[in-house]
């Protein structure tokens, strides 16, 4: 990835979301797709899920409630939930 | 409903409210709900007893357990919705409150919550109650060796897997006897506190 692309990745909310997932799950950002789901890979277990919640809250400066934490079952659901909290995702805007 | 059941619930009537859930003593009018849950193939699959539970069997079971002070039966509530069931059983023959070793069991019936982080909350609430209110020293759990999700689940709750599994026989002469290997887990108060601390930041509302 070129420096320009990596900068863009870090500026977009989608990029920030993917980076948060990659950090919490300790996997490569290339493995983060919309259909990645909780417990679908060994790395996304309950411990990683708690790390993910903390990472997303820190990254997007918000606090999730219990229902949000329970329902955050996939990357797509994470976008839906964060959108509810006012985060705008570029790829969801055009949908 | 059997009149012997209708007017008399469990011997224990105190609810446990902790970790964002409430554990309420099982009431007679909930027996059919539990029977439907327990007969669901998805819920029955990891259980030791796989046989179909009839209405008569359910009522007979409740008549036996409701006054037994060596065990307690609860329904799990999240935001006032019944989502599962859990229980405590003395493992040393002493009534709850005097038992040093207690075995716990639970299942979530609501599909929205099965396999999610919420699954840990009633288990944490139950375990906390055992150590803080019942003054037990050790919690026990038995898990089928084939149930890898439940094995990991107990480890996250702080349970220590014991080196030697046990072998039990289940079923009946009519339905066939099956030999099952179970992993044995033990938990003490310190291990529970350490596990609970990891979940504490995520106990919201």
Image: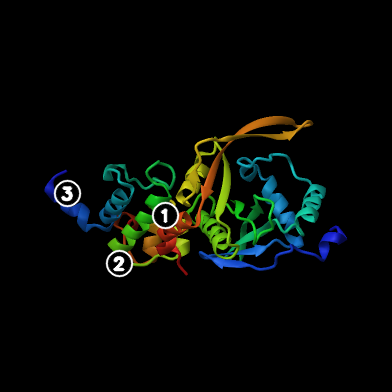
The answer to which of marks 1 and 2 sits earlier in the sequence is 2
Of circles 3 and 2, which is in front? 2
Figure quadrant of residue A89: bottom left
From this view, report whether residue B24 is shown above or below residue B44. below
Which is closer to the viewer, label 1 or label 2? 2
Residue A47 image point, x, y percent: 40, 51
Q: What is the CA distance from the residue labelled 3 to the residue labelled 2?
A: 24 Å
Subunit ID for the residue under disc 1: A
C-alpha gap between disc 1 and disc 3? 25 Å
Q: Which mark is residue A61?
A: 2
Residue denoted by label 1 = A77
Tell me, for residue B121, which label it has, or none: none
Percent position (x, y) of residue B21? 55, 64
Label located before the other in sequence (3 or 2) = 3
Question: What kind of element bears circle 1?
Answer: helix
Mark 3 highlights which residue? A5
């Amino acid at each position: 990835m070129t420096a320009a692309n990596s900068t863009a990745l870090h500026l977009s909310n989608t990029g920030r979301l993917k980076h948060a997932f990659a950090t919490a799950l300790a996997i490569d950002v290339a493995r983060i797709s919309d259909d990645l789901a909780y417990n679908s890979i060994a790395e996304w277990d309950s411990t990683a899920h708690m790390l993910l919640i903390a990472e997303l809250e820190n990254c997007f400066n918000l606090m999730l409630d219990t229902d949000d934490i329970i329902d955050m079952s996939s990357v797509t659901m994470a976008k839906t939930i964060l959108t509810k909290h006012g985060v705008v995702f570029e790829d969801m805007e055009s949908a | 409903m059997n009149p012997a059941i209708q007017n008399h619930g469990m011997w224990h009537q105190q609810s446990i409210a902790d970790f964002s859930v409430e554990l309420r003593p099982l009431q007679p009018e909930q027996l059919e709900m539990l029977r439907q849950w327990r007969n669901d193939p998805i819920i029955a699959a990891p259980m030791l007893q796989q046989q179909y539970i009839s209405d008569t069997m359910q009522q007979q079971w409740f008549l036996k357990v409701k006054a037994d002070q060596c065990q307690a039966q609860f329904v799990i509530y999240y935001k006032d919705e019944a989502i599962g069931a859990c229980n405590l059983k003395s493992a040393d023959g002493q009534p709850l409150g005097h038992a040093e070793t207690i075995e716990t069991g639970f299942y979530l019936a609501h599909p929205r919550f099965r396999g999610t982080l919420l699954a840990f909350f009633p288990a944490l609430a139950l375990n906390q109650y055992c150590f803080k209110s019942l003054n037990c020293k050790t919690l026990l759990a038995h898990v089928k060796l084939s149930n890898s999700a439940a094995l990991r689940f107990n480890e996250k709750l702080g349970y220590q897997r014991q080196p030697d599994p046990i072998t039990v026989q289940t079923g009946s002469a009519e339905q066939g006897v099956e030999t099952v290997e179970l992993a044995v887990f033990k938990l003490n108060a310190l291990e529970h506190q350490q596990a609970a601390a990891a979940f504490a930041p995520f106990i919201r509302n």
